[in-house]
Image (spheres, rainbow, N blue to C red):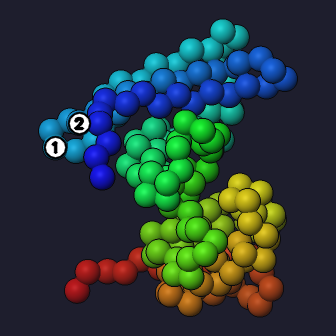
């Protein structure tokens, strides 16, 4: 599959029908690899720093082009015909299809990190973000534990644990 670069990715935040922030990022080849070659922020009422810190990731435009876009094209989905997610990256690009039984280590490691950051209530917030049931979000954390990516919580029924870092031999 070939994706012609450069491409511009728009991230638009609209509240109450009014555009609040528009971020345009150009993804192009730098050397032999895709990279963000430029990014501009447009905010008529000023940048809402809290929203940006919560919802925007610097790597999101690159992850859209290198992760989400190829998967959509492989699935036969026209990316211009659907609303692409604007939050939840890199997970939105890595999220498994519901028909897939195997979850990648990369995806589960990211879920484990998010679980530790979110703490209590993680299942509901992950479920909303990934459009799955809370039980599915819980199962992802359980799978991360089974695969040895996340330690057990400090006590039964508690939220928590630690990321287990594999050390090179």
Q: Residue furthest top?
A: 44
> What residue would you read off at disc 2?
29
Q: Residues within 10 Å of mark 2 (few under 14, many from 20)?
A: some
Given contact means CB atoms under 8 Å apart, are the residues at marks 2 and 1 in contact? yes
**Disc 2 to disc 1, C-alpha distance:** 6 Å
Q: Residue furthest left?
A: 31
Q: Which of 123 and 93 lies nearest the eye of the viewer?
A: 93
Q: Residue furthest front?
A: 76
x and y percentages locating residue 97 in the rendered image: 58, 68
Element at label 2: strand
Q: Residue 13: which numbered mark, if any?
A: none
- Residue at left 56%, top 63%? 95
Q: Which of 111 and 53 lies nearest the eye of the viewer?
A: 111
The vertical placement of 15 against 96, above or below, is: above
x and y percentages locating residue 38 in the rendered image: 36, 24
Q: Residues within 10 Å of mark 1 (few under 14, many from 20)?
A: few
> What residue would you read off at disc 1?
32
């Amino acid at each position: 599959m070939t994706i012609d670069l450069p491409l511009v990715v728009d991230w638009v935040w609209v509240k109450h029908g009014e555009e609040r922030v528009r971020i345009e990022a150009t993804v192009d080849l730098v050397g032999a690899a895709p990279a963000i070659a430029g990014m501009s922020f447009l905010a008529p009422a000023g940048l809402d720093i809290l929203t940006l810190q919560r919802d925007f990731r610097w790597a999101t435009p690159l992850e859209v082009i290198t992760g989400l876009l190829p998967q959509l094209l492989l699935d036969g989905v026209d990316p211009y015909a659907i609303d692409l997610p604007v939050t939840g990256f890199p997970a939105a690009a890595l999220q498994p299809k519901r028909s897939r039984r195997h979850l990648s280590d990369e995806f589960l490691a990211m879920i484990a990190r998010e679980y530790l950051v979110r703490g209590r209530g993680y299942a509901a917030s992950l479920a909303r973000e990934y459009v799955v049931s809370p039980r599915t979000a819980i199962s992802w954390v359980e799978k991360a534990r089974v695969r040895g990516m996340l330690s057990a919580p400090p006590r039964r029924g508690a939220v928590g644990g630690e990321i287990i870092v594999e050390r090179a031999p």
